[in-house]
Amino acid sequence: MRTTTAVTLATLAIFGLAGVWAIAADGPALTRDNWGAQVGFAPEVPAELAPERTIDAANAAGHVAWLSEATRLMIAKYGMKITTAPYEAYAPSDGYIGATNRFRGKASLKVIGDATSEREIEGYEGGLPFPAPRDGREVAWNYTLGYAGDDSESEFKVLWISGKRGVERTEEWKTITVHRAKFRTDVAPLPEIPALVKNGVIAATLSTALRPPDKKGFASLYFGYLEPREPEGWLYVPAQRRSIRLTFGTRGESWNSTDLLYEDVRGYTGSPEWMDWRIVDRKTLLAPVHAGVVTGAGHEREAFDLDTAPHWNPRMKWEPRPVYVVEATPRFKRYPYARMVFTIDAESFHILTKEAYDRKGQLWKILINASNSSPDPATQPMRVALSLVVDTQADHATAFFWHSQKSNQGVDPGLFSLTSLRKFGR
């Protein structure tokens, strides 16, 4: 029998056993084989989710228990179809597993009330901060500090799509990122890059538009911080040949005039301190984790049904995943969303789907993130395959499709400078 998180937590509270979920934190050493069971929980894999089954509007009602709210809405309103695939266990790199073992039990969260500028996490030194998380805040920190590799270099295509008219325009971008300037586990220098860390930086990104010609040369450089503060950096405008300093992620600001807000990147790009987090459920849902998407330039029509309205439905595999359904409500009075509901994978702690509601409480955005298998799980993260954000009120979407991704290359931290930004912009 399946027990929902709400019932489980209520029972634990009555008997004073709320700490039972933390037992795994003192359990056996984490390995590639036991990672999922120790940091999360095992998924249910019923016969009805056998591989190569199709779930669509005609039969979705019979599979509702295995579909997130976002997925159900995509099927019901937009005719999305799901092809099922077998569950595959996930584990991060050996370096990240090792760091989790070394620093297990050291991280803790202090009470900060409604504060939004005070750092909440203490004692964290690397790896997954909270194996077997006990509440929504620990899940949020596992997402924030979860494994994505130490660095990456990607090229991807952005498609603006009207539900009635189809693809309106496209752009291609290149991005170089240091995901972890501190708490690194895979690529030297370990465990940190002093030149970035001395300025409080935990992440740095350099991006530039490659196509079309009239957009080529637009570039951005920004830095992220572990402290609860918004990313900062510069935007290079080639027509003016100047760099403009600004704060990225101004609440409610669209990324590059798409349906994606800055706070939507990866699912959520803000600080955990900016939200109140609550676990709604702990269950198995279908999600595109080992999605088998054919990536690369020229394969867009294999990844998306661009010819059939609404012209954005993805084509990929969905497997049973152990997830936390988590609700986040903002601590800011003026925030674009009144609340957000995430499905967060219990093994990788990546955000798989998101529903964002406007200030009137109406559904506004749906976000789906899909990944492909890692080329070498012991040393490399999973590959990003595609992301889709749908404005359900405007019947408009933006699709992000990866042409290439290289990870853990040992990116030169000297790239993240105004000089490089201007070179990228030429």
Image (cartoon, helix red, strand yellow):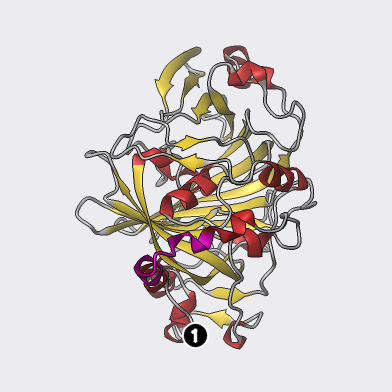
Q: Residue at x 67, y 46 (%)?
A: 100
The residue to which callout 1 is attached is 1
Seen as rendered, the residue at the extreme left is 360
325 shown above or below 410: below
Q: Is residue 14 magenta?
A: yes
User: Relative to the observer, which residue lies in front, 185 or 21?
Assistant: 21
Label 1: how many Cα within 10 Å (few below 14, some 14–19, many 20+) = few
Residue 141 left/right relative to 69 = right
Residue 196 image position (x, y, % from top left)? 61, 20
Give the residues in magenta.
11-21
Q: Residue at x 61, y 66 (%)?
A: 316
The answer to whether residue 300 is seen in the rendering is: no
Amino acid carrying label 1: it is Met
Q: Residue at x 65, y 65 (%)?
A: 37
Helix, strand or loop under label 1: loop
Q: Residue at x 60, y 54 (%)?
A: 25
Main secondary structure type of the part rendered in magenta: helix
Residue 287 left/right relative to 333 = right
Residue 154 image position (x, y, % from top left)? 66, 39
Q: How many marks?
A: 1
305 shown above or below 242: below
Residue 221 image position (x, y, % from top left)? 54, 23
* Residue 309, quarter of picture: bottom left
The answer to whether residue 119 is seen in the rendering is: yes
Residue 330 image position (x, y, % from top left)? 30, 45
